Amino acid sequence: MVSQRLTLQKTDVTAVSLLFNALSNEYRVSIINLLRTGPKNVGEISDDLKIEQTMASHNLKCLAFCGLVTSQRLGKTVEYTLNRETVEPILRLADKHISKYAVNLRNCKTLER
Amino acid sequence: MVSQRLTLQKTDVTAVSLLFNALSNEYRVSIINLLRTGPKNVGEISDDLKIEQTMASHNLKCLAFCGLVTSQRLGKTVEYTLNRETVEPILRLADKHISKYAVNLRNCKTLER
DNA sequence: AGCTTATATGACAATTCCGTCATATAAAAG
DNA sequence: CTTTTATATGACGGAATTGTCATATAAGCT
């Protein structure tokens, strides 16, 4: 009997790092956070977050590519909806982790290296 | 009575994005993945992953800063231990998400934008 | 059709990040 | 107390990412 594989394979390391890369940007986390209150179109997102429409579009594309949001055209506007199934538990874990093990992250702009 | 706040505050957006930034690099995810098999010192990590010692050190510092690993000097060597409490559930969520919503991440090097 | 509003795309400069080198510190051994 | 082994740190050039601008596409209206 072949021993079970406990470690991820190379391809998954890439996929995982790309997924978290989507969550490693303040604009994208802000957008996700805003969408927790319900679906919004691009104009509403850029207005609410006071960012440019182009910036919103770029980052929404990135989030959609990673399956963290879905989009639906409604006439002239495009509505974005959060993938709550993934995002809510991940954000809860992150929040809990930060309070418990990484409060220092609240007071810095960049990672130590 | 003041309405409850459902959204994260600005500081948390920063902290969350920094935390995920730590998980957005292939070396760091590989290290985490390796440490799932048990604690290892820097030499073992760089040998196992076939990366330079300096590279291992830099990335371990980053992971430690975010509370994702802890370190302990044992004589001449320094042993790193995974923070399983946070990392295991987060990796499980990520894995599940990728299979279900983002299989495309397995076949690309960089995020769409 | 032409005009307006909404969103997406592509390109480019500026910023940030990463890989590597040189070197510093730390502990043990001789 | 010098040498060796193990790890950490700082700096620098190249690579990747980001913010912004110009422009393209898409839908609805007149």
Image (cartoon, coloured by chain):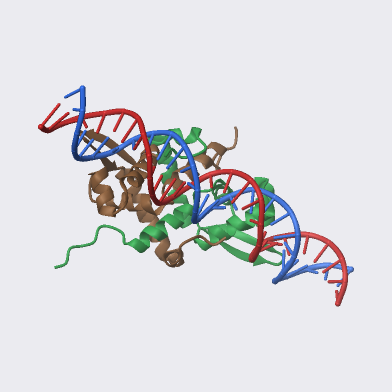
Chain colours: A green, B brown, C red, D blue
Quadrant for the C terminus of chain B, please.
bottom right
Instruction: Note whether residue A83 is visible.
Output: yes
Is residue C1 found left or right of B41 in the rendered image?
right
- Total marks in image: 0
| Spot occupied by residue B101 in the image (x, y as percentages of width and height) | 46, 64
| Spot occupied by residue B2 in the image (x, y as percentages of width and height) | 60, 33
In the figure, residue B99 lies in which quadrant? Answer: bottom left
Nearer the observer, B87 or A33: B87
Q: Residue at x 33, y 46 (%)?
A: B56
Q: Residue at x 23, y 51 (%)?
A: B37
Q: Residue at x 34, y 44 (%)?
A: B54
Is residue B52 found left or right of A24 in the rendered image?
left
Nearer the observer, A65 or B72: B72
Quadrant for the N terminus of chain B, please.
top right
Residue A65 in the image: above or below residue C17: below
| Spot occupied by residue A24 in the image (x, y as percentages of width and height) | 49, 48
| Spot occupied by residue A110 in the image (x, y as percentages of width and height) | 49, 39
Residue A40 in the image: above or below residue D10: below
Q: Residue at x 17, y 63 (%)?
A: A3
Nearer the observer, A52 or A42: A52
Nearer the observer, B25 or A25: B25
Residue A62 in the image: above or below residue A99: below
Instruction: Note whether residue A39 is visible.
Output: no
